[in-house]
């Protein structure tokens, strides 16, 4: 691992408050690896051998059942993924593949569990991260079950605008095919919905989003702090879509 990688990892909520000696011990057994785009790094059902820390690139977390597949999250630097499986020493519930050239630090799950028992501040950080992840999944489930597809898309576009500082024009953070999968839609349904939303105050041209009437879009999305609000900075770090800690 490069020495310059360590400060970025140390800055993560997960590692920020643990003792320096314990952080160095944990990192000494970890290593960095570069992955090409389109590579399956983790397959659902496999043993959870490593916690993954994304330093460069992007990783899609996805799930499969029968002949169906859905996007669960897209993780970007600097962030971890599949923490819960590592702590539980349980099989991965999701698969992970690189969307572009990606640099990952692999932390052995057995060392992670040992440090969880040794460092109190690290234990608290893990519990907080898992709690934030659980609440993010509940929010996502509520949106999927309680909103129509049109309302979900409107809510996503409005939320991304707010995350971008309230701007009325921004670029989608992920490809439309990934967004459609995450929102529980086919790409064709997403395209039709985006066209319909032009009457509700938003126009999408390629990856560019332009909010033409924020009041109309807000009236359709009906923002709800118990669905759309983020818990803490943990929820948003390194993720183009809400996190799935698994």
Image: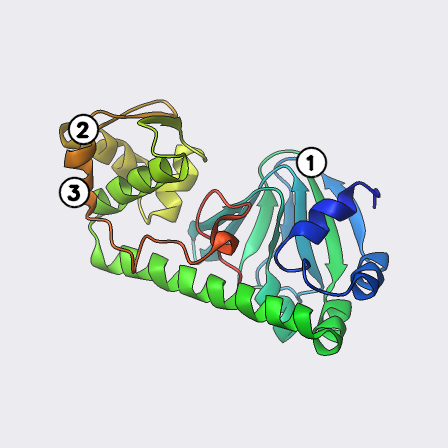
Upstream in sequence: badge 2 or badge 1: 1
Horizontal and vertical percent position of residue 119: 73, 73
Instruction: From the viewer's perspective, tell me whether residue 138 is left or right of residue 237.
Output: left
Label 1 neighbour load within 10 Å: few <14, some 14-19, many 20+: some
Horizontal and vertical percent position of residue 223: 24, 49
Give SS at disc 3: helix
- Write the residue at 44% across / 33% down: 175
Horizontal and vertical percent position of residue 245: 53, 60
- Write the residue at 63% across / 45% down: 78
Instruction: From the viewer's perspective, tell me whether residue 191 is left or right of residue 21.
Output: left
Q: In the image shown, does 216 or 85 lie closer to the viewer?
A: 216
Instruction: Tell me the CA gap for discs 3 and 1.
Output: 41 Å
For residue 220, which numbered disc appears in the image?
Answer: 3
Label 3 neighbour load within 10 Å: few <14, some 14-19, many 20+: some
Res. 122 visible in picture:
yes
Upstream in sequence: badge 3 or badge 1: 1
- Write the residue at 25% across / 60% down: 145
Q: Nearer the viewer, mark 2 or mark 3?
A: 2
Instruction: From the viewer's perspective, tell me whether residue 84 is left or right of residue 136.
Output: right
- Asked if the residue under mark 1 is in contact with the one under mark 2, i.e. CB atoms within 8 Å, the reply is no
Upstream in sequence: badge 2 or badge 3: 2
Of all residues, the one furthest to the bottom in this rendering is: 117
Of all residues, the one furthest to the top in this rendering is: 205
Q: Nearer the viewer, mark 3 or mark 1?
A: 3
For residue 213, which numbered disc appears in the image?
Answer: 2
Q: Which residue is mark 1?
A: 36
- Write the residue at 46% across / 56% down: 232
Q: In the image shown, does 108 or 40 lie closer to the viewer?
A: 108
Coloured how? rainbow
Label 2 neighbour load within 10 Å: few <14, some 14-19, many 20+: some
């Amino acid at each position: 691992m490069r020495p310059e990688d360590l400060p970025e990892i140390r800055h993560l909520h997960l590692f920020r408050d643990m003792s320096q000696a314990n952080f160095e011990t944990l990192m000494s057994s970890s290593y960095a690896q570069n992955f090409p785009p389109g590579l399956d790094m983790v397959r659902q059902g496999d043993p959870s051998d490593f916690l993954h820390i994304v330093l460069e690139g992007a990783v899609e977390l996805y799930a499969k059942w029968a002949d169906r597949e859905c996007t669960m999250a897209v993780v970007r630097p600097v962030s971890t993924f599949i923490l819960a499986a590592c702590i539980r020493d349980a099989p991965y519930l999701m698969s992970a593949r690189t969307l572009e050239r990606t640099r990952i630090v692999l932390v052995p799950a057995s060392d992670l569990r040992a440090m969880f028992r040794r460092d109190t501040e690290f234990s608290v950080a893990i519990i907080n991260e898992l709690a934030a992840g659980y609440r993010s999944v509940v929010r996502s489930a509520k949106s999927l079950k309680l909103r129509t597809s049109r309302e979900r898309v409107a809510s996503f576009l409005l939320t991304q605008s707010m995350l971008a500082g309230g701007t009325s024009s921004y670029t989608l953070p992920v490809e439309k095919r990934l967004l459609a999968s995450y929102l529980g839609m086919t790409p064709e349904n997403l395209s039709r919905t985006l066209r319909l939303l032009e009457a509700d105050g938003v126009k999408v041209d390629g990856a560019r989003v332009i909010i033409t009437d924020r009041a109309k879009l807000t009236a359709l999305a009906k923002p709800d702090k118990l669905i759309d609000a983020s818990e803490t900075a943990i929820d948003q770090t390194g993720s183009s879509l809400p996190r799935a800690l698994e």
